[in-house]
Amino acid sequence: MSGLRGAAAVVGIGQTPYYKRGTSPDSEMKLALRAIVAAAEDAGLDPAEIDGFVSYGSERNTGQKLMPGLGTRSLRFAGLAWTHGGGIPAAVGLAAMAIYAGQADVVVVYRAMAEGSNQRLQVAVTQDDTPAQFLANGIDMVLQRSAMRTQRMIEHEGVPRETLEAIAQAGYHHAQQNPQAVGYGTPLSHDAYEASRYISEPYHLFDCSRENDGAAAVILVSAERARTLKQTPAYLLSCPMGASATMGSREDNHEPYTSVGFIDLAKRMWRESGYGPEDVDVAQIYENFTGMAVGTMIDHGFCTAETAGDVLQLDNLVAPDGGIPINTSGGNIADGFIHGMGLVLEAVRQIRGTSTNQVPGAKLSMMAGGPGDSVTSTALFGSEATL
Amino acid sequence: MAATARIRGGIGADGPFWDALDAGEFRIARCRGCNEWLMPAHFRCGTCGSWDIGWDEVDATGIIYAWTRNHAVSDVLKERRGALPYVTALVELPQAGGARLPGVIVGDPPNLRIGARVRGTIRPPEERSRGYATMVWQIEDDSAPATRVGETEA
Ligand SMILES: [Zn+2]
């Protein structure tokens, strides 16, 4: 097992409200500051103590720009994890590595997005790196490529298309208990799902995540320091990032094609943590699109293509009693989408016991990064008892 | 038309692919050191280490490997809105080591399915293709609806 296992923990979480896309009253920079300061207050730390800054995707609100507003005493570590949503757990892992290596003591991982001050999706999310082979042929970096992969998963591998609706329903079901969620107060019925228009087959409108303005942040410190602070620590047990030999940037020539990139990462995570999918109490599964989340569940070993129809049923995916509750704040689809960063906060809340859809006694809380990214990452958080 | 680097995303080693389409030819990258087909094209063959990458002309035929019918597109593809709904696919090229190439499927064929055989034609540069000549694909009339790609002949 890795020396990194349990070496650092999340001790503070903070976020701004999720604003409807394009309606944030604040700039991205101010949103980032608000989320980071909120995370510091949650941890009982002075924001000036933060000496490490890590983000992912194309985050442009860098540590060096934030530090005058935070009163930073010394910026000792800064980094950006490749790639898009696939970089989220990797960013948390970078923070833990910096702490473990003695390069920083208080590291914030954050993401801020606002329509007014950044160009959406193509730049903010996908870094403007859609290859010509796709763009020239009317194929978007994320939507259509994901839709084609899901279509093959259904048509060729026999995964029931009802699994997509189950993922969407789980998010909306949990959002009804979370007053902060964008989907709060608007439950999703089977009929409404079925009746919603197609975006890119097999995806209906409700298979697609929402975009919001806002910011979210988590603060990590060493395990020793975490035990002296006021919040229940969420220890990082394992957080592998990467791509196996047949993955990486292959313009959909990766193998196996319907994998969303987690097969080897999950094996590393189970090995490094000493736990397996059957031990996980609750999971936040990044769903840009529902079908990609189905791929994440299969890659991690929660089910196979053959058993997906049995495992990925709404009753089994919801707190408090489901076998593997997912996206308990509503997820990207029904909570809100700050490039997936909200999922990290919810994974931590489950260890603290403070989720609005708490899984009773949750000790092992997983968070998977962006599925289908050419390099991605996944994380397992645990309570003190899991160390 | 100089096709290199008009779109900056991707690896950027596929300039000759677009130049070939402009010249009416369908060419796929292939390592001269070990004969491996390279999709996407790269500057160096990761299998044998050769920097000598050639471009072999291949038949414009393939098999639908995955597909989607698009009903809405983001602003990134706003030039395509007038053509909605349209079908895109990954086309498998058995004659190029099974390389998979993204492309538009012409029309809205009733026999659209994974495993269907397609034939390509080159469409001249358009605004909606960002100024690139593109290979578009038509399902072969005799490509009968089968059930699974694994059960088709090739
Ligand atoms: Zn070679």
Image (cartoon, rainbow, N blue to C red):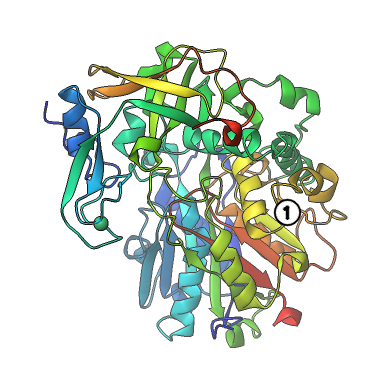
Q: Is residue B51 in view? A: yes
Say which chain tag 1 marks. A
Q: In this rendering, does residue A209 appear at all? A: no
Q: Is residue A230 left or right of residue A241?
A: right
Picture coordinates of residue A349, whole percent (x, y): 70, 63
Residue B64 location (% of width, % of height): 48, 29
Instruction: Name the residue nearer the viewer: B47 or A238.
Output: B47
Percent x, y of residue A243: 45, 60
Q: Which residue carries the number 1 mark? A: A303
Q: Position of residue A152 (x, y in %)?
A: 58, 36
Name the quarter showing ligand 1. bottom left
Q: Is residue A152 above or below residue B122?
A: below
The picture quadrant where one finds residue A185 is top right
Furthest residue in direction left, as rendered: B2
Q: Which element is circle 1 on?
A: loop
Vertical side of A330 occupied by A361: above or below: below
Q: Quadrant of residue B120?
A: top left
Q: Residue at x 18, y 29 (%)?
A: B20
In this rendering, is residue A4 above or below A327?
below
Is residue B108 depicted above or below B74 in this figure? above
The image quadrant that residue A367 belongs to is: bottom right
Q: Of residues A312 and B34, which is closer to you in this image?
A: B34
Point 20% across, 34% down: residue: B6
Q: Give the residue displayed 54% in from the left and 78% down from the top.
A: A221
Q: Residue furthest right?
A: A321
Residue at point 72% right, 57% down?
Answer: A302
